[in-house]
């Protein structure tokens, strides 16, 4: 009986040891997987280093300089503001500013593609240092991120098909209006015209395709974007060029990142003095909007 008990105890001890080893291996594997996931791709590495900052989620100006790289969130599918060209390079009006900021800071730039709905999240989680993606300044967003000085004017616009041009929201009737989740167009129509049916999409590309397929009677977005869309293709008219108030577009940084925000504002003042934004307009937007829109859209930051 004693031998039997000793045998059972030995088996129990062996099982306990095996369980200990397995748990230890499991923890090690999980850590390795986590480490691998956080280090996969340079954008994620930058985000990880941002999260490790002594300042919290964001990286301060000095930390960005020390790393030799600034991570900037831009659109990759919104010609002519932020897109990937035929050579696989980021291009557009916002990208021109991003490249210049990096140059003036003396660091490389790393672009991270963002969607409208992710812009606040990417700053709150430290995935990017700056957002330059047609980011309209609003009071609601200013509670979550810090905006820099504005570099463009913008309002909402509504584009529709030529066979039924929408010149007033009253003409929409029972039709659906396409919007992109996380945009000021979605917010404006939800708050001011709740009777209008909205067909929501997460990405610009999906919204564009749906509108081209007539899944909605109209598409509401920043007027700069719907005008660009209508000018680039036949069969569309921007029946409402300005909807709601005139707003501004500005770079944004994580809430509390005053060192980076203040530096960007100082640099943008210098860029304003040299008419950088007019030059960027003529390089990237002139073919789309023409000279008539330049003075309306461009803001040259100044003291």
Image (cartoon, rainbow, N blue to C red):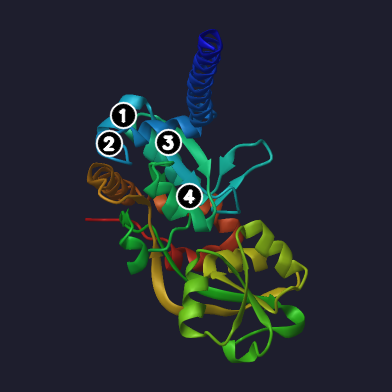
Give the CA separation, mark 4 to mark 1. Answer: 21 Å
Residue 119 x %, y %: 46, 53
Residue 99 x %, y %: 45, 39
* Residue 61 badge: 2
Give the CA separation, mark 3 to mark 1. Answer: 15 Å
Q: Residues within 10 Å of mark 2 (few under 14, many from 20)?
A: some
Q: Which residue is label 1 attached to?
A: 65
Give the CA separation, mark 3 to mark 4. Answer: 21 Å
Q: Secondary structure at mark 3?
A: helix
Give the CA separation, mark 2 to mark 4. Answer: 20 Å
Residue 299 x %, y %: 37, 60
**Residue 144: quadrant of the picture:** bottom left
**Residue 174: quadrant of the picture:** bottom right
* Residue 47 badge: 3
- Residue occupying the point 50% across, 29% down: 34
Q: Which residue is label 4 attached to?
A: 94
Q: Secondary structure at mark 4?
A: helix
User: Quick check: 86 above or below 66?
Assistant: below
> Which quadrant of the rendered structure holds the N terminus?
top right
11 sits left or right of 56 in the view:
right
- Asked if disc 2 and disc 1 are in contact, CB closer than 8 Å, the reply is yes
Give the CA separation, mark 3 to mark 2. Answer: 15 Å
**Residue 106: quadrant of the picture:** top left
**Which residue is at the front of the view, 93 or 186?**
186
Q: Nearer the viewer, mark 3 or mark 2?
A: 3
Marked residue nearer the N-terminal end (4 or 1): 1
Marked residue nearer the N-terminal end (2 or 4): 2
**Which residue is at the front of the view, 180 or 234?**
180
- Asked if disc 2 and disc 4 are in contact, CB closer than 8 Å, the reply is no
């Amino acid at each position: 009986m004693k031998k039997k008990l000793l045998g059972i105890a030995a088996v129990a001890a062996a099982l306990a040891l095996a369980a200990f080893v397995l748990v230890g291996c499991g923890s090690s594997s999980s850590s390795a997987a986590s480490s691998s996931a956080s280090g996969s791709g340079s954008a994620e590495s930058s985000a990880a280093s941002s999260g490790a900052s002594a300042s919290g989620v964001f990286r301060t100006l000095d930390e960005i300089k020390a790393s030799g790289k600034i991570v900037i969130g831009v659109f990759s599918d919104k010609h002519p503001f932020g897109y990937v060209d035929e050579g696989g390079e980021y291009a557009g009006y916002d990208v021109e500013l991003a490249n210049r900021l990096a140059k003036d800071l003396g660091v490389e730039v790393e672009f991270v593609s963002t969607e409208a709905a992710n812009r606040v999240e990417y700053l709150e989680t430290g995935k990017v240092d700056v957002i330059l993606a047609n980011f309209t300044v609003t009071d609601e967003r200013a509670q979550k991120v810090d905006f820099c000085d504005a570099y463009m004017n913008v309002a909402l616009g509504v584009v529709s098909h030529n066979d039924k041009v929408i010149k007033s929201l009253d003409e929409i009737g029972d039709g659906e209006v396409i919007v992109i989740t996380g945009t000021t167009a979605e917010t404006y129509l939800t708050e001011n015209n709740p009777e209008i049916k909205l067909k929501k999409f997460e990405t610009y590309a999906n919204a564009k395709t749906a509108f081209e397929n007539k899944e909605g009677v109209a598409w509401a977005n920043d007027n700069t974007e719907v005008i660009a869309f209508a000018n680039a293709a036949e069969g569309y008219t921007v029946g409402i060029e300005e909807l709601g108030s005139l707003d501004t577009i500005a770079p944004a940084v994580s809430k509390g990142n005053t060192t980076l925000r203040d530096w960007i504002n100082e640099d943008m003042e210098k860029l304003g003095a040299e008419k950088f934004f007019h030059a960027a307009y003529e390089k990237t937007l002139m073919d789309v909007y023409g000279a008539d829109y330049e003075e309306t859209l461009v803001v040259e930051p100044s003291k």
